[in-house]
Amino acid sequence: MQLTTTRNKELKAKPDPQKLGFGTLFTDHMFNMDYHPDKGWHNPRIEPYTPFTMDPSTMVLHYGQGVFEGLKAYRTGDGHIQLFRPQANFKRMNYSCHKLCIPAFDEAMALDALKQLVHLEKEWVPNAPGTSLYIRPTIVATDPFLGVRASHTYRFFIILSPVGAYYPEGFNPIKILVTREFVRAVRGGLGDTKTLGNYAASLLAGEMAHKEGYTQVLWLDGVEQKYVEEVGSMNILFVIDGELVTPMLNGSILPGITRDSALALARRWEMPVSERKISIDEVYEAHRAGRLTEIFGSGTAAVISPVGTLKYEDQVITIGDGHAGPVAQKLFDAIMDIQYGKAEDPLGWVEPVV
Ligand SMILES: *Cc1c(COP(=O)(O)O)cnc(C)c1O
């Protein structure tokens, strides 16, 4: 399959790297590729970033048959551009496709296309500390049809957005609300995929948490509402008696690449690590006994996000002293240093672009 490139004749002005937010600005080009049952995935192309026109009956608009990914390109101190574990993102995307009845794509080809796109847009990778180019690969069902079935045709696209540092004011702990009223995913459902509806399903709980002054929701399992699952767009990790504990991947938790990276580094440092069921009662008991020293989230956007306050029913607990704990800090620094090329890459996670 030959990738074609059509250059945009009107390039936008680049934003001030000190003033970047998240997800509002997009670069001059995007990747597009189509699927048709007779042709398979075909016509991969880099072309000017433009709006889609869609028939109002387009299936994804009605039944949510779509998947996405989120990763970043980083500029190193000496001006190179690199990706962090992009193979893992495309692998997970194909797994999401499988669960959503979307035909699989060639992961090596998608990575090659992404590298060519980022290469073309290299001036858009910002250079201020902590900034990056956010990458959003997406696949959506495109049949114009109102019956409920898997679509026959699809569009795969990748867009790029320069984003600011997640912690412009420092690495500050967030407040998390544990919800029992809502669940995010159930056994046998789509919780382990990055599919559109999961995020729609999380909005009401998120809004209710915001009204109470909390940043995010911590979801419990959808069957017993007893075991900790994850935080909306982040996995969750605990330090209990010096051990790094995180919920095991049980089919309803998103298998985060940052989670996997944190566990791999901790094991390399010979820190005890356990992936297992952890109930919310155990978290509170460990806190009462003084054995719970840290809670933090992990995800591409923030890397590591320390949790300073947790509320479950009427019990509010404070973790740490208002600062990130030592394990959160060490993981944050280690992962960021690899992503920005400041440290060795002992596990072969970095994929150079330029
Ligand atoms: C994307 C995501 C994560 C984090 O995954 P990373 O690969 O680390 O970015 C965690 N939970 C959910 C629900 C997500 O969508």
Image (cartoon, rainbow, N blue to C red):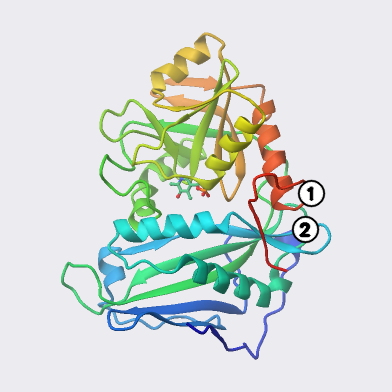
Residue 75: x percent and y percent?
A: 74, 61
Q: Quadrant of residue 249?
A: top left
Hey, what amino acid is under mark 1?
Lys
Would residue 335 be visible to someone looking at this image?
yes
Left or right of 29, for residue 69? left
The residue lying toward the viewer, choosing from 252 and 224, is 252
Q: Is the C-beta separation of discs 2 and 1 under 8 Å?
A: yes
Q: Residue at x 70, y 57 (%)?
A: 131
Residue 11: x percent and y percent?
A: 67, 84
Q: Earlier in the sequence, mark 2 or mark 1?
A: 2
Left or right of 46, for residue 323? right
Would residue 69 be visible to someone looking at this image?
no
Mark 1 and ligand 1: say if the CB distance to the nearest ligand atom is below 8 Å: no
User: What residue is disc 2 on?
Assistant: 76
Residue 124: x percent and y percent?
A: 70, 71
User: What residue is disc 1 on?
Assistant: 342
- Dividing the image into 4 quarters, which one contains the C terminus? bottom right
Compared with 310, 217 (above or below) is below
Label 1 SS: loop
Label 2 SS: loop
